[in-house]
Structure formats: structure tokens, C-alpha cells
Image (cartoon, rainbow, N blue to C red):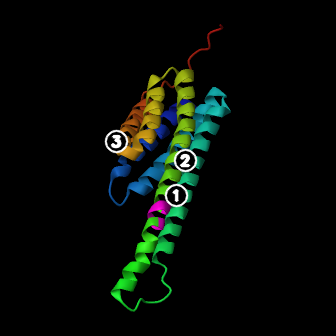
Amino acid sequence: MNGLDQARILGGIGSLLMVLSIVPSAGGVLYIVGLVLVLVAVKQIADALREQKIFNDVLIAVILGIVGLAVGLAVGFSGFFSFFRLGGPPARVEEFWELFRGRIPLFIITLLIGLLAVWVFLIVSTIFFRRGLNAIGERMGAGYFKTAGLLYLIGAVLVVVVVGFIIIFVASIILTIAFFTMPVQQPSQQPP
């Protein structure tokens, strides 16, 4: 079994696990395992094509995604904890509402900043991911990789209007198809 054949199987299984991440209670684990398998597959493809930039782009995409999630969680938790910190129990119900009324706008602003940070990191991450998938598609002559990359980017931009999640899900399905239909022989290089 050559590197591309193994990459096809690992990438296909990995992207299929990413599709199955919608399964309740096991989705996060399935997504992480799938992402690792896709990374291994992309590394094998990059090695077979002797083009390290492909793997670097996809790796940068994953790192940016993790950093974006961490930044968003940090901002969200800081807003949550600043909202619920109490200096002592209020004596009357009016004092209680007055205490929280002053913190609600700050909490909402902090939450929006956290979500904005996650969204920006997601878009930048998918730009790198798309770049890596486009390179695989061009070098392997497999157009599904390009389609998946484009749909990931469109989905990331539209995630704020919820339809982006559906587009990202469809992109994961197309990525699964792209890996399973990927040629196991590198196309011959034609002189220009």
C-alpha cells in the first residue's frame, strides 16, 4: 500500500468521523479523532507530492482554529465570571436587580467580543484550509477537494446566520467523497 492509498483511507475515515460529529455526546471526540486522521492523511499526501506547503497550510488552519476557540472561551468565561461575582448578598430585591442591571450590558458586550473573535479565527483558519485543499486538488487532479475548500470558506463566513453550519456539514461530506475518490497514483507531470 503506497502513501497515497493509505492517505485516501485515513482521510476518508477521518472526514467521515468529522461528518459524524453531529452525534450527541460523542460528537466532540469523533471530530477530534477525525481531524487528527485528516491531518495525518494530508501529511502523507504532502510527502508523496513533495510539497510541504500543503501540510503547513492545513496545520496552520488547525492551530488557528484551536487558538480561536481558546480565545473565545477565555473571553466568554471572563464575561461570565465578571457577571456573577458578588460582593455580598444584596439586602433587598431591588438591590439585587440594580446589581445585575449594571453588569448585563458588559456581559453582552464581552460575549459578543468572544463570538466575534471565534468567527474571525474561523474565517482565517478556513482560508488556510482551503489553500491546502486547493493545492491537493490541483496536484492530484481531484476537483472535490477544491469544492470542499470553497464550501468550508463560505460556511465559515455564513456561520453567523446559522446556514453556515449546514454548509460546513455539506463541505465535510464532500471532503469525505474527495478522499475516497482521490487517485492513488500521482498524475504524471507534463512539461510546460
Q: Is residue 102 above or below residue 26?
A: below
What kind of element bears circle 3? helix
- Residue receiving disc 1: 72
* Percent of width and height locating residue 47: 64, 33
Q: Which residues are magenta?
A: 106-110
Amino acid type at image mark 2: Phe
Q: Main secondary structure of the magenta part?
A: helix
Label 1 crowd (10 A; few <14 / some 14-19 / many >=20): many
Amino acid type at image mark 1: Gly
The residues bearing labels 3 and 1 have C-alpha atoms spaced at a distance of: 21 Å
- Quarter location, residue 25: bottom left
In the picture, measured across the screen, residue 160 lies left or right of residue 129, that is left
Q: What residue lies at 61% left-to-right and 37% top-to-bottom?
A: 57
Label 3 crowd (10 A; few <14 / some 14-19 / many >=20): some
Q: Is residue 50 above or below residue 119?
A: above
The residues bearing labels 2 and 3 have C-alpha atoms spaced at a distance of: 18 Å
- Residue receiving disc 2: 121
Label 2 crowd (10 A; few <14 / some 14-19 / many >=20): many
Quarter the C terminus occupies: top right
Amino acid type at image mark 3: Val
Q: Is residue 163 above or below residue 54?
A: below
